[in-house]
């Protein structure tokens, strides 16, 4: 049985899950919101000072690298990503995060009929000055 289609990257963050993170971090930017202008390329623009990012998982390494780079400019970046601890991007960038939170169970993303077929993690990139 197929739970998620690889034909789309449009899987919204569960609303209650996002709201809990937003209460903690007070986000002011999302570089890849669903149903927004498709001409905006979140990888090529400056991010906000307090960014939440649930990136397209088909190009995850580029988004993780961008999140890390934005954090090095003094920005807080919180990402919701698959917990793929065996990837190069995980070891090059995620391991530099200030906080890695593994999600218990599997999330049910917006628009999905079933829970995700993979574990998820919340990654918090923040500079020492922001702590």
Image (cartoon, grey):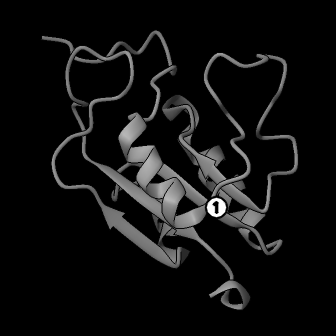
Give the answer, above or below, for where 112 lies relative to 51: above
Quarter the N terminus occupies: top left
Q: Which residue is mark 1?
A: 77
Task: Kindly indicate the quadrant of the structure image that contains residue 27.
Answer: bottom right
Q: Residue at x 68, y 82 (%)?
A: 127
Closer to the camera, 128 or 92? 128
Task: Kindly indicate the quadrant of the structure image that contains residue 103.
Answer: bottom left
Most distant residue in the front direction: 23
Quarter the C terminus occupies: bottom right
Left or right: residue 112 compared with residue 53: left
Left or right: residue 117 compared with residue 17: left
Would residue 88 be visible to someone looking at this image?
A: no
- Mark 1 secondary-structure assignment: strand
Residue 116 lies, in percent from the top left, at 25, 31
Residue 49 lies, in percent from the top left, at 78, 62
Count up the numbered dots.
1
Left or right: residue 105 compared with residue 20: left
Residue 123 lies, in percent from the top left, at 48, 62
Residue 52 lies, in percent from the top left, at 61, 50
Most distant residue in the left direction: 1
* Disc 1: CA contacts within 10 A as few (<14), some (14-19) or many (>=20): many
Would residue 75 be visible to someone looking at this image?
A: yes
Q: Residue at x 37, y 45 (%)?
A: 17
Q: Residue at x 87, y 43 (%)?
A: 45
């Amino acid at each position: 049985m197929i739970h998620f289609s690889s034909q789309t990257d449009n899987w919204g963050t569960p609303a209650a899950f996002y709201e809990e993170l937003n209460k903690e971090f007070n986000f002011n930017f999302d570089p890849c919101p669903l149903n927004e202008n498709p001409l905006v390329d979140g990888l090529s623009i400056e991010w906000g000072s307090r960014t939440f990012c649930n990136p397209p998982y088909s190009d995850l390494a580029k988004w993780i690298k961008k999140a890390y780079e934005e954090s090095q400019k003094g920005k807080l970046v919180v990402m919701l990503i698959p917990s793929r601890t065996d990837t190069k991007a995980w070891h090059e960038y995620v391991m530099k995060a200030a906080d890695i939170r593994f999600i218990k169970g599997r999330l049910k993303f917006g628009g999905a009929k079933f829970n995700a077929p993979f574990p998820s993690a919340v990654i918090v990139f923040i500079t020492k000055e922001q702590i």
